[in-house]
Amino acid sequence: MNRGNLLLIGGACVLAAGVTLAVTASPLIATGLAIILCLAIALMKYPWMGIAFLAVYLPFNGVVSSLLVKLGQAQFATVFGAAKDGVLILLFVLVVFSPRIARVRPELFIIVLTIVGLGAVSGIGSSNVEQAAYGWRNDFLPLLLIIIVPAVLDRVNASRISTVVVVAGQGAGIVAIATWSRGIEWLYVLGRLPVPEGERFPSSLFSANSIEPRAFSPFSAPNEMAVGFLIIMSFIWMMGDRKFGTRIALSVLPVVAIVLSESRSGLLGLACLAVVVVCLKLRDIRPGVALAFASISGVAIGLTALAYVNVRIETGNDPSIGGHAASLRESLQLLVQHPLGIGLGQVGPRALRYDDNPVLVESFLLLLALESGPLVLVLYLALAGRIVSLAVKEPRAGAAHLGLVAIAASLVSQIVLPTMQDGAVSYLLWIAVGIGLLHGQKRPGAGETDGVTSSGDAAFSRPESVLVGRR
């Protein structure tokens, strides 16, 4: 970023802050507006910085928001939590009105916009507009990253973003271990304990028959943290030309954090991630061996999971498994009763913000169907299937498979938990998918090398600069 651009951004922000301060006499509002304006101008000039911001912001969103609330800054915490949505919406608007939109695969563009549009339409069945908007923001808005990321990034900036994700993941791993070591004390530091009158006890932070909390920070909850680290692991293993030993070393903190989260879906996701990565590497050498390994590993993981569930049910030591099963049965019955959906923002744990008795389904896939109808679920599965099929066609294991690995790692969680309602999880997943699509073959309007301008970004000023190399 050259000096002229810095002066332009700085001058505009100082002017906006001065005008706001004169009108409102509030330094906090003036500073906030200046920061927002600064970010908006920076994104218009260097849109890839928005993805870089998200890569740093997402793992720490939960802990920062909780600390702000504890300090009595609930409104500021709300603004902080909504920052990622503002960045996403601004980037989407910039992409739609940019020649870079041609870089997005037409079928993915249509499917994503159809899902997001149908999700918005289902808001008609919601109790109020605010609740519908909140539900749409949690469940559908992050899908726009599938359009934004391939349009905004080139391969050089995608590599930078991946490095940022990995580094932020190491920091998040340190926070996870450090906060877990503090035990119950950490819940008091965050203000999760003592529980205010009228609010529910955070039982999800504890395992059955345990008085010590599971690891969850810097994310909002243990299962969400496990999936977040699984996606970070996908970046570690599929991006860059790191040596095997380096990848192992970078994986230590995320794996420890996943284990400390005591998330069964996280551990199963870790097994799925390992199997997919090994299969991709084997396919480069011995395709037949890769297929056999995938088949045997899949059966082994399935049988292990079934045996674990059976033992837990027979011994009665894990009431949560029965709760999961009951929730799935009830959700399927509700789906039959409401084929057009119950209403946006009325399903899942996030609905507790507006309703004391929401439908708490233990599956993000069923959550989508219950909120907006089975058609949305079918389209969502079609979208995931298309992304996976594009990755499978890639001849060599690498960055083009990032989305495939991330989806495989998060699949168990999507089936049995509503973790994708958490923005830190869903944003990370779709950023990974977008970068994988960016590296795929035969992308419309994309070349082999994806060159960059001298400013480090070619997003909107000179789109032809990225059309270099072999088509």
Image: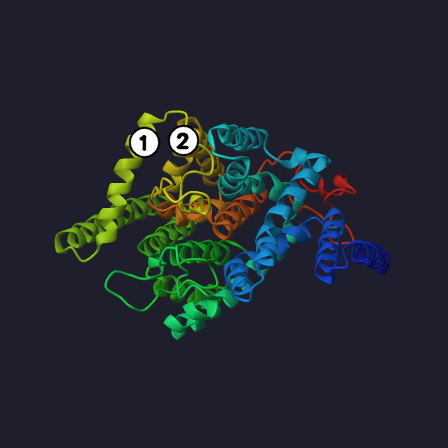
- Upstream in sequence: badge 2 or badge 1: 1
Asked whether, in this view, residue 101 is left or right of residue 352, the answer is right
Specify the farthest residue to the front. Answer: 197
* Residue 206 x, y percent position in the rendering: 32, 62
Residue at the spot 75% in from the left edge and 58% down from the top edge:
30
Is disc 2 placed on a helix, strand or loop?
A: loop
Q: Is the C-beta separation of discs 2 and 1 under 8 Å? A: yes
Q: What amino acid is at disc 2?
A: Ile
The quarter of the image holding the C terminus is top right
The N terminus - image quarter: bottom right
Using residue 300 as the reference point, say whether residue 124 is left or right of it.
right
Front residue of 411/283: it is: 411
Instruction: Name the image quarter holding residue 295.
Output: top left
Report, in whole angstroms, how far the alpha carbon at label 2 lies from the one at label 1: 9 Å
Q: Which residue is mark 2?
A: 342
Q: Which residue is mark 1?
A: 334
Provide residue 437's location: percent of width, then percent of height.
Answer: 55, 41
